[in-house]
Amino acid sequence: NAGVTQTPKFQVLKTGQSMTLQCAQDMNHEYMSWYRQDPGMGLRLIHYSVGAGITDQGEVPNGYNVSRSTTEDFPLRLLSAAPSQTSVYFCASSLVGTGSYEQYFGPGTRLTVT
Amino acid sequence: GESVGLHLPTLSVQEGDNSIINCAYSNSASDYFIWYKQESGKGPQFIIDIRSNMDKRQGQRVTVLLNKTVKHLSLQIAATQPGDSAVYFCADTGATNKLIFGTGTLLAVQP
């Protein structure tokens, strides 16, 4: 299994540009989520999904969109990039209903918005 | 979690010593707690978890202790090795069953 994969690893955007961060998992996990990690702020939940066709907002959803058309993929879209979105983005996935909230994380995408 | 600014709390230990990393949580309704390890440039990696009906759980070289009275969680690492150098995050489920992460502690292992 490849686990959770994310592309690209690095990205530089200009203010106002849009882009999609890709996330895929091959573990047949129902739950997928996106976090951003900023210095001194830990990991903050942006959006999550409990299954194909179902998405919901997390703690910091503004400026981001998600969709979940398949179990495997959960892309994160930046509609109009802003410098405040400079961060490291992590995608994670987990099973549902096991009694554990253990999430498997991807390697991250480092995004810089100038 | 509570922001502590741009500088992470740091715990510096000698190789071979035991390490204790502490974490405070705020929501008394949390019923699940988890520790993650994050090495530089990588995603967080699961270490150990514990439910609120337990006060101690052991893994390989790691022990998690939960004190619900004072809302405190700790991770003990026995015989710390250079490969243990990383940022350690605690997380709990809060009131929403979504993981809420702390700001992390940097563990620096001195040879």
Image (spheres, rainbow, N blue to C red):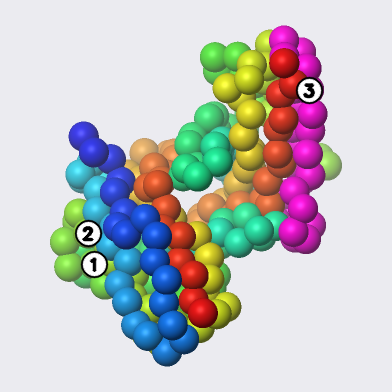
* Residue A12 visible at all: yes
Please, what is the three-letter code of the amino acid marked with disc 1?
Arg
Instruction: Give the label on residue A68, or none.
Output: 1
Write down the chain letter for disc 3: B
Using the numbered discs, state the Cα–Cα distance from disc 3 to disc 1 in whole angstroms.
44 Å
Task: Assign a secondary structure to mark 1.
Answer: loop
Q: Which residues are magenta?
A: B1-29
Please tell me how crowded label 2 is: few (under 14), some (14-19), or many (20+) other residues with Cα within 10 Å.
some
| Residue plotted at (21% across, 63% down) | A52
Front disc: 3 or 2: 3
Task: Assign a secondary structure to mark 3.
Answer: strand
Residue at which label 2 appears = A73
* Residue B56 visible at all: no
Out of B9 and A100, give the one closest to the viewer. Answer: B9
Please, what is the three-letter code of the amino acid marked with disc 3?
Val
Membership of B20 in magenta stretch: yes
* Label tally: 3
